[in-house]
Image: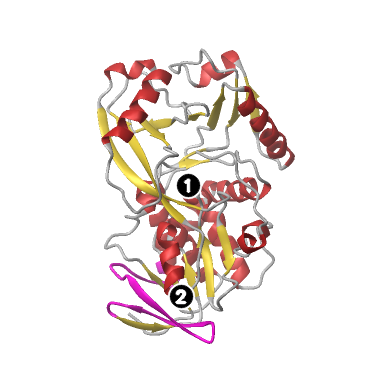
Amino acid sequence: MRNKADAVIIGGGIIGMSVAYHLAKEKFGQILLLEKERLPGSGATAKAAGGIRAQFSTKVNIEMSMLSEKMFASFKDEIWNDALFDRVGYMFLLEQEKDIENFKRGYDLQKELGLNVEMLKGDDIRKLAPHYNLDNVRMATYCKDDGLGDPYEFMAGYESAARRAGVEIKYDTEVINIVVANDVIKSLKTKTGEISTPLIINCAGPQAKLIGQMAGVEIPVEPVKRQIVTTGELDFIEPFFPMVVNVKTGLYTHKESKGLLLGWADKNVESSFDISVDPDYTDNILERALNCIPGLETAEVGNQWAGLYEVTPDHHAIIGWEPELGGMFHVTGFSGHGFMQAPAAGLLTAELLTNKIPSIDISPLAPERFAKGALVDETNII
């Protein structure tokens, strides 16, 4: 491993790999990516549910995801990888008046920004989710340009492309300290040696706060456990079944192999790095799933796992220079939306670091917003 680099990226999930590829594409210089795990994509990326959507409540999140969806759609041509963006759509089921009002506001903004989103009722919803209990559903929002993807496959595509572009990638290489002098990054240390660099790009996801603390700065990112269950084979799942989110219950589900993936966010889980599978958490998911999809009564549990969200106070990512320390750039805090926004995050980071005009305005994601109190909550979260 080299002992000097123009940029060191910490974190080898899909965010870090996307940043590495796009920065190398701009011929930034010697780029080194460090990942503490022994295998690629074995952290938060491997645990992601795989949803890709642009139905958000804020302009910056909508535009980030719309840009990413264009990049997912052209991934094969640019990256030379067969990772599939399955555009089966994304549908939010609405039962309560407060949710309908909130999603109507989001719908208006999404349409204004050019998103191909629809408001559906009755039979139009039933056609997309014929096996779903819609007794209390009053309407839905649906975007057919949203869909599903395999996070690992897209991450692997970026990894291969980054290597071809000259990025050095090292696994099983944990950063243990960051050396700072006169409020400027000088180097970082791993168990195998010290690397001199003027730039650290923090793509450490749930561990981003720990990276910041090594350099003496506080990053408002907290790790929060989320859990997922998959079923065995089901004979009623149609190939057109979209990602479906029941806003009242919080259950989200999409087709997975020949069965379903089921997930739910327990808002009472406290911040920690615990990713053990909690049987009570699983039972909560299954209870909600049985109420929403009666056909699951005879289904078998295929697999279950837990992963970590990297959550910020306003549920928006942090992309930009650390205001308290020279030479540290953050690309983190995606609050459950890292996979779906990874292509745009990599491109925009490379544009900012090479002094180009960003493809979209991401000033609302700047790290200094927290000190200024300039927070706007993303309300369309799972």
Q: Is residue 177 magenta?
A: yes
Q: Is residue 205 above or below residue 213?
A: above
Front-most of 75 and 202?
202
Name the residue at the right extreme: 112
| Any part of residue 10 in sight | no
Looking at the rendering, which quadrant does residue 54 occupy?
top right
Front-most of 273 and 205?
273
Per the model, the C-alpha gap separating discs 2 and 1 is 25 Å
Where does residue 336 sit, x and y in percent of width and height? Answer: 47, 47
Front-most of 198 and 150?
198
Q: What is the basis of the colouring in this image?
A: secondary structure
The residue pinned by badge 2 equals: 215
Residue at x 55% of width, y 49% of height: 315
| Any part of residue 156 in sight | yes
The residue mark sitting in front, 2 or 1, is 2
Dots 2, 1 in contact, CB < 8 A: no
The residue pinned by badge 1 equals: 336
Residue neighbourhood size for the residue with mark 1, other residues' Cα within 10 Å, grouped as few (<14), some (14–19), many (≥20)? many
Q: Is residue 155 magenta?
A: no
Mark nearer the N terminus (2 vs 1): 2
Where does residue 337 sit, x and y in percent of width and height? Answer: 50, 47
Where does residue 338 sit, x and y in percent of width and height? Answer: 48, 51
**Which stretch appears magenta?**
163-192
Residue at x 41% of width, y 55% of height: 155
